């Protein structure tokens, strides 16, 4: 299960290759023993205002204190922003594992749990062992490599009386040896190192090492088998997320970020993208029945690479824009316990007759593989040929007709990408209204200046191209803090198509705060705001643009224009029963007390009075059932035309309709010009942005007859970039 760690950091992965890459690119958590009674843990965290990584120092005593305090320190753990809590709230998953473990353990044996987390599966195994009289002969070994989770697991084991029944090894499984840590090979392996794609958590390398070094021949395995499935679909929305070139043709504004379809200088990385596809069910046209892709038998050593030629018969006429995929777990050898991540429109007859129902969850989703260009036309009854392949960590598809396999233009699509963006950014760059708002604002700014010095402070290639295209006399400087050299190459590649010389654009690698680089005062400072690599963060974390503007304060002309000139923090009360359920606090999980993990894992619901969970980032349109209960309020203004400073906001909220309020949706509307005539919103009505969600500890029934029902306060700390929100109901 991919725990959705912020900024791509996932310390849970037991995959050897992923560990090597992480060691090269991201410093791992470090533990320092200061004294026999004190341990420090160093965690890497990204500062949203600086864009730089910084170490957060956490002592074991601080960790323990934070779990008991009503106001824990904000730096205590990255775990609060993961979907681990959602996974433990997945009762269908928990029941399936419990049933499979109890069915497998019929005698004393050696069980190994890899990627143990809070120790839930280890405790299930120990309990099952005790029920067959195996407390003395049987044993349970658990591997968990991430120090904060190791501490959490120890606490959970202790509070459930399992600390003497489960032996915990704070290491990756490939660091454990029989004859050293383990007395003997294990008879049964239980694990849950699965992501939405199935393989991304390093499942294959972990199983290979386990079969080679840790398990007896022909071991018992839970899960026993996994099967991946796919389905061909047509969807206008999904097409927009991968086809920038044809969207720009429709926009007809003259800006060409993807001028040549065979080059795809700006495109998606060819991979599967996790998405809640049930939210798109009314917009999707199914073009085939579900088809089997790969089967993975966990009870034997898996292969690292395989290919499969699949022939799929189209059931409808249309254009294949994507392949939606999911997987089905067979947890027990007998084939009676299953778990599936299939979308709700899938009939069980195509998978298994024993598949139980599944509630909405966020830790496992479906996956989308986009078909590039305009899609693949097909007719009812026509066969579509698909070549599926997998490596150690991913599954990919190729729908290119065999006759075009050697066509150089097809190969260029894979080889000539300069910038890869997430699907939502591709969709946004092709959105006509979004483009028009920025084009109008930039054109108005240029009309008021003669030969201005224009600076793009973020990673917006769109604004760099726009400024250079609209004014031949302007001087453009771009920083591209995340894109770096790729941004320079990209501007050179698209300059001719957009009618300007790349020599007119200077891309600087220095920090924004270096004033010596400017020969004259900056008259136009712009940003989307968008920082490459920071996608998926909370809306106000893009206020990094405000900090960059402040660092340039002395370099700005007195009448300089800043686009956007203002950010407006918006808030709306919402009913979110599915999301609230998935994030509510834990107590009993299949008979084991997990109440002590709530603060560390960021529980949002059923907390003690005066406690609240963290504000989290979600695509609200993918969050299951959702309903707005109030109008949209303006909670706070960020005046970007002035240097950054702390802000406060307070309001009384009225409700428009009765319902159960689970929390608040929060986002930023960016005001592009001084006249406020051009605004781009990052709110729930836009599917291209994540919103902030502050869930209540206890859902509140509300109605529209009360004068006001809720008071909301917010404060923004300009030194840390953190936004705190408190609410109270009358």
Image (cartoon, grey):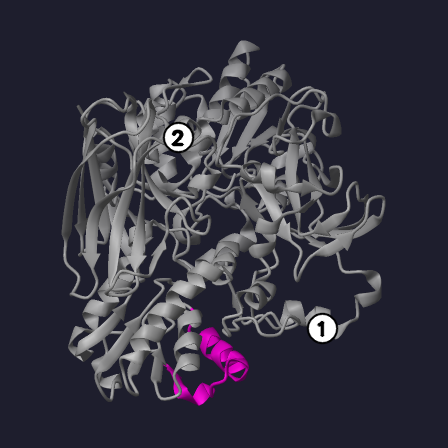
Q: What's the residue at 18%, 79% (across, down)?
A: 557
- Segment colored magenta: 483-507
Q: Toward the viewer: 615 or 327?
A: 615
**Which residue is disc 1 drawn over?**
409
Q: On the image, which quarter does residue 471 sit in?
A: bottom left
Q: What's the residue at 30%, 63% (across, down)?
A: 672
**Between tags 1 and 2, which lies in front?**
2
**Which residue is disc 2 drawn over?**
576
Q: Is residue 496 magenta?
A: yes
Classed neighbour count for the residue bearing mark 1: other residues with Cα under 10 Å, few (<14), some (14–19), many (≥20):
some
Whether 669 is drawn above or below 155: the answer is below
For the residues marked 1 and 2, what is the alpha-carbon distance in whole angstroms? 46 Å
Main SS class of the magenta portion in the image: helix
Q: Element type at marker 1?
A: helix
Q: On the image, which quarter does residue 356 sit in?
A: top right
Q: What's the residue at 21%, 63% (across, down)?
A: 640
Q: What's the residue at 51%, 80% (across, down)?
A: 498
Classed neighbour count for the residue bearing mark 2: other residues with Cα under 10 Å, few (<14), some (14–19), many (≥20):
many
Q: Are marks 1 and 2 in contact (CB under 8 Å)?
A: no
């Amino acid at each position: 299960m991919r725990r959705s760690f912020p900024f791509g950091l996932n310390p849970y992965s037991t995959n050897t290759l992923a560990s090597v890459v992480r060691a090269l690119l991201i410093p791992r958590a470090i533990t320092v023993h200061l004294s026999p009674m004190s341990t420090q843990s160093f965690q890497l965290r990204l500062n949203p205002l600086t864009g730089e990584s910084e170490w957060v120092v956490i002592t074991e005593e601080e960790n323990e204190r934070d779990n008991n305090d009503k106001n824990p320190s904000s730096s205590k753990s990255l775990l609060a922003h993961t979907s681990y809590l959602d996974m433990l709230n997945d009762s269908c998953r928990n029941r399936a594992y419990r049933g499979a473990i109890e069915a497998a353990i019929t005698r004393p044996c050696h069980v190994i749990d890899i990627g143990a987390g809070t120790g839930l599966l280890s405790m299930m195994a120990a309990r099952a062992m005790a029920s067959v009289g195996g407390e003395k002969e049987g044993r349970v070994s658990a591997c968990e490599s991430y120090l904060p989770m190791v501490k959490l697991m120890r606490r959970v084991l202790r509070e459930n009386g399992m600390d003497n029944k489960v032996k915990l090894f704070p290491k990756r499984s490939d660091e454990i040896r029989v004859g050293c840590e383990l007395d003997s090979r294990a008879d049964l392996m239980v694990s849950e190192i699965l992501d939405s794609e199935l393989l991304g958590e390093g499942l294959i390398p972990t199983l290979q090492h386990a079969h080679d070094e840790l398990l007896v021949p022909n071991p018992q395995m839970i899960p026993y088998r996994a099967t991946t499935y796919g389905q061909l679909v047509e969807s206008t929305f999904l097409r927009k997320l991968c086809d920038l070139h044809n969207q720009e043709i429709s926009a007809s504004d003259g800006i060409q970020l993807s001028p040549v379809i065979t080059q795809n200088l700006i495109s998606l990385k060819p991979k599967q993208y996790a998405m809640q596809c049930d939210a798109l069910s009314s917009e999707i046209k199914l073009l085939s029945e579900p088809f089997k892709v790969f089967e993975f038998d966990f009870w034997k050593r898996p292969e690292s690479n395989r290919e499969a030629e699949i022939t799929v018969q189209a059931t409808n006429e249309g254009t294949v824009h994507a392949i939606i995929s999911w997987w089905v777990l067979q947890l027990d050898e007998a084939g009676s316990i299953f778990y599936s991540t299939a979308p709700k429109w899938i009939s069980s007859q195509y998978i298994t007759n024993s598949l139980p129902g599944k509630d909405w969850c966020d830790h496992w989703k479906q996956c989308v593989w986009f078909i590039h260009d305009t899609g693949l036309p097909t007719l009812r009854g026509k066969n579509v040929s698909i070549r599926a392949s997998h490596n150690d960590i991913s599954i990919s598809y190729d729908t290119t007709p065999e006759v075009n396999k050697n066509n150089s233009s097809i190969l260029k699509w894979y080889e000539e990408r300069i910038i890869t963006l997430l699907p939502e950014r591709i969709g946004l760059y092709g959105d006509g209204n979004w483009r028009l708002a920025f084009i109008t604002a930039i054109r108005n700014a240029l009309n008021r200046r003669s030969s201005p010095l224009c600076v793009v402070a973020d990673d917006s290639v769109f604004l760099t191209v726009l400024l250079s295209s609209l004014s031949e006399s302007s001087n453009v400087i771009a920083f591209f803090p995340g894109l770096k050299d790729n941004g320079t190459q990209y501007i050179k590649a698209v300059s001719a198509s957009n009618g300007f010389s790349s020599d007119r654009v200077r891309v600087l690698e220095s920090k924004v705060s270096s004033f010596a680089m400017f020969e004259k005062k900056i008259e136009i400072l712009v940003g989307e705001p968008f920082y490459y690599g920071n996608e998926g963060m909370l809306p106000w974390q893009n206020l990094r643009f405000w900090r960059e503007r402040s660092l340039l304060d002395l370099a700005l002309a007195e009448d300089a224009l800043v686009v956007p000139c203002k950010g407006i923090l918006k808030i709306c009360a919402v009913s979110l029963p599915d999301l609230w359920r998935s994030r509510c606090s834990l107590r009993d999980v299949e008979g084991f007390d997990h109440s002590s993990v709530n603060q560390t894992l960021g529980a949002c619901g059923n907390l003690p009075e005066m406690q609240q969970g963290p504000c989290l980032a979600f695509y609200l349109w993918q969050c299951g059932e959702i309903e707005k209960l109030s109008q949209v309020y303006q909670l706070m203004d960020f005046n970007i035309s002035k240097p950054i400073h702390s802000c406060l906001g307070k309001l009384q909220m009225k409700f428009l309709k009765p319902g159960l309020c689970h929390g608040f949706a929060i986002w930023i509307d960016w005001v592009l010009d001084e006249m406020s005539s051009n605004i781009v919103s990052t709110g729930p009505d836009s599917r291209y942005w994540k919103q902030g969600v502050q869930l209540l500890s206890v859902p509140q029934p509300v109605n529209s007859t009360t004068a006001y029902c809720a008071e909301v306060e917010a404060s923004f700390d300009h030194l840390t970039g953190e936004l705190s929100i408190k609410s109270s109901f009358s």
